[in-house]
Image (spheres, coloured by chain):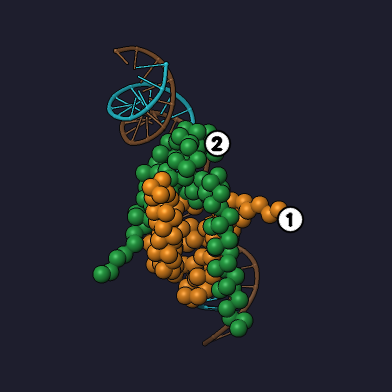
Chain colours: A green, B orange, C brown, D cyan
Amino acid sequence: MLELVTIKQTKEELGKWCKLQRGRFELSQQELADQLGISRYTIQKFESGKNSTIDTILKIAHHFDDLEKFYKGVKAYNEKNTNRSLY
Amino acid sequence: MLELVTIKQTKEELGKWCKLQRGRFELSQQELADQLGISRYTIQKFESGKNSTIDTILKIAHHFDDLEKFYKGVKAYNEKNTNRSLY
DNA sequence: TTAATATGTGTATTATAATAAACCCAGTAA
DNA sequence: TTACTGGGTTTATTATAATACACATATTAA
């Protein structure tokens, strides 16, 4: 059974992630927006799976302590493939 | 030694990731842009660590077969934390 | 009931990402 | 040399994300 992951699905999952993290930290959309210095509407759109900017998602990730994990994942991936040709 | 990861650093690492994947697939910026149906300038900006949209990064990830991995990571994280209160 | 809070939505404006087109400057091959 | 290619940049325009504000609908507490 072939299951193709779409960009739309991924954005929706990212929206769920934000909503979940808000719940874990017991923050309303307004509180999160205030703490990030962005508008509640931007949070609302992001959580409903709309398109957003990298800055928005990384601000959210940073606030919920997920930025470092993401950064290190990308960095490790890059370093692995950067050195690939040397071996 | 405390090392804080910034949003800027993360965007730069994402730019490197795109450049690396292009190299692995031996694609020029123009070729990648054409295959994604976006402009070379957008690729150029993304690779140089500028701000972009989620759609742009997900299109690139999808093209390099990294979308599914990312999607599943977010989904697994969400499902783990969704069910947390039940246990 | 009323009041307060959280979320979703609508509209208008502003900021900025995306685009197209043209340049420049390496390299590199003819 | 000349011609081509890849990558970086500029300019002007278009598309759209972000913003501020208001309003509606739950939901919850007084």
Chain identifier of the residue bearing label 2 in the image: A
* Name of the residue lying farthest toward the left: A1
**Would you say A49 lies left or right of B10 here?**
left
Query: Dot 2: what SS?
Result: helix
Quadrant of residue A29 within the rendered picture: top left
Amino acid under disc 1: Met
Residue A65 visible in this rendered orientation of the protein: yes
Subunit bearing disc 1? B
Q: Is residue B59 visible?
A: no
Which residue is painted at 31% across and 64% down in the image?
A: A4
Residue at the image point whose x is 62% and y is 51% from the top: B6
Report the residue marked by disc 1: B1
- Nearest the camera: C26 or A14? A14
Q: Is circle 2 on the same chain as circle 1?
A: no
The residue shown at (50%, 75%) is: B24
Mark 2 vs mark 1, CA separation in Å:
27 Å
Q: Closer to us: mark 2 or mark 1?
A: 1
Give the number of the disc on residue A71.
none
Residue at image mark 2? A35
Camera-side residue of A1 and A55: A1
